[in-house]
Amino acid sequence: MIKIKLHSNSDIKYCEIRQLILLLLLFSCFVGYSQDRYKRPKSNPIIPDMIADPSIVKIDGVYYCYATTDGYDKGLSTAGPPVIWKSNDFLNWTLIPDFFPSVTNMVYVAPSKVIKFKDQFYFYPTLNREIFAAVADTPQGPFRLVNNSVVSSGNLKPKPLVPIKGPKGTKGIDAEVFVDDDGQSYLFWAQRGAARLKEDRITLDTITTVIPTKRLGYSEGPIVFKRKGIYYYLYTLEGDENYKYAYGYCKNSPLGPYFFPENDIIATTDTLKKIYGPGHGTVFSEPETDNYYFAYLEFGNGSTNRQVWVDKLTFNNDGTIKPVVLSHEGVGALTKSKKLSNLVVPKQVSTSSNLPDLIVQPIKDSTLKRTENYSPVNAIDGSNGTRWMADSTDVSAWYQVDLGSVIKIKKAAAYFSKPTAGHAYKLEYSQDGIRWKVCGGHAAIKVQSPHMDLFSIKARFLKLTFLSGVPGLWEFKVYNN
């Protein structure tokens, strides 16, 4: 077996390898854990899953994140199912599946944020690499395509709002919607395309504007917002590790013309902090405040294996934007959050196996030196950016925590890797590690995150056994009330 002892500074002091034959037979790994490491969890990335192209909006006190589901390992040719992540405090997020059921057979990416008009909610996703309009009665759906387009029946071909070959050389992906103070709506899209939306919110004006920018080259993921009478237009440059955002501003109209300051790059790679490629994202603010935030995708493991980060967006007195300070700490809770005082941090974790480390290959920047490890400790470190994964050959994967002594516990929350593909599992408890009783889980495959089990038991050990789904955990949390 492999034993790794972690001291309070979280450094590995020694690694003793014993009984190699038993290791090969049992695939077992035991890891001690220091509670100190959980004291100040970093809030970037904000969500325990691989997602990208975030559009975040706060509606009736609830934060909604509409995004591309990453982690399906086929690059831009595919994506995971359309889902929403929502939160009451911006710290604890819940997955909402099946919010757009009619497009499950289409490639869904880069959704815009949601806007409200006449008691209905509209947004503009990219489907099969074209922009469509969709509507629902609530911000979490179910959404349906408009323009009399019905995808699920197959009888009508859906009509895109902006086709892939957009007008005037633009590209029909990555929509951004903006509503001005007078109620006029505008749509922006890749390669600097822009146009007014008609009052029905599903039809574009026939006049398309191409926003002239200071920096040339391919651009996508536009962001438009207004602050203190100033319109801001943010646009991306390059990609991968070199993804970055530049901007311009004006007071006339969201269609410009925009003025571009000398220091117009507001988000770019920070090699010292090892944060790479801040790309396609959104800007949002707390209603009735001057608190603005910049949400963006980070390079992650490359290709379509990215995560969403959020940092503060600040301004100079003249209205120009200060360069964003990218951080691992993030912004934390934006409203009152549940305290972690009832969180029980395990003393030791053990698993059936661990996936070998992944060395991330740089694409455009040789300074990228990144390795993803899949240690069991990752699932109890309070971070959405680390995870435990079982070995790919492990057909009976399990994850076990030792609480140190027999204590009363009342809840467990499992944040599985690749939650949009669904999971089934069994949760057991024991006081001695020998005799086990079932206390949670489900045999049916369910798409959700987190998976919550409520009980009132006295236990020292909890063991989660995977019945279906990707055997991995972003986080596994145990509570005593």
Image (cartoon, rainbow, N blue to C red):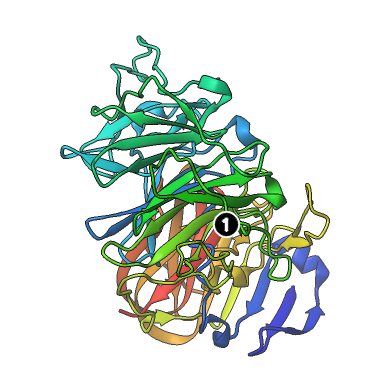
- Residue at screen point 50% across, 45% down: 258
Total number of numbered labels? 1
Q: Quadrant of the N terminus?
A: bottom right
In the image, residue 159 sits, relative to residue 348, either above or below, namely: above
Q: Position of residue 399 (x, y in %)?
A: 56, 65
- Residue at screen point 46% across, 37% down: 81
Q: Return the residue nearer the eye: 402 or 271.
A: 271
Q: For residue 367, what is the image quadrant?
A: bottom right
Residue at the extreme left of the image, as rendered: 119
- Residue at screen point 42% across, 29% down: 104
Q: Position of residue 84 (x, y in %)?
A: 38, 47
- Residue at screen point 68% across, 45% down: 239
Q: Return the residue nearer the eye: 394 or 303.
A: 303
In the image, residue 260 sits, relative to residue 200, either above or below, namely: below
Residue at the extreme bottom of the image, as rendered: 8
Residue 433 seen in the current view: no
Residue 453 seen in the current view: yes
Q: Amino acid at mark 1?
A: Gly
Q: Return the residue nearer the eye: 185 or 274.
A: 185
Q: Residues within 10 Å of mark 1 (few under 14, many from 20)?
A: many
Q: Position of residue 57 (x, y in %)?
A: 34, 52
Residue underneath mark 1:
472
In the image, residue 126 sits, relative to residue 407, either above or below, namely: above
Q: Position of residue 12 (x, y in %)?
A: 74, 82
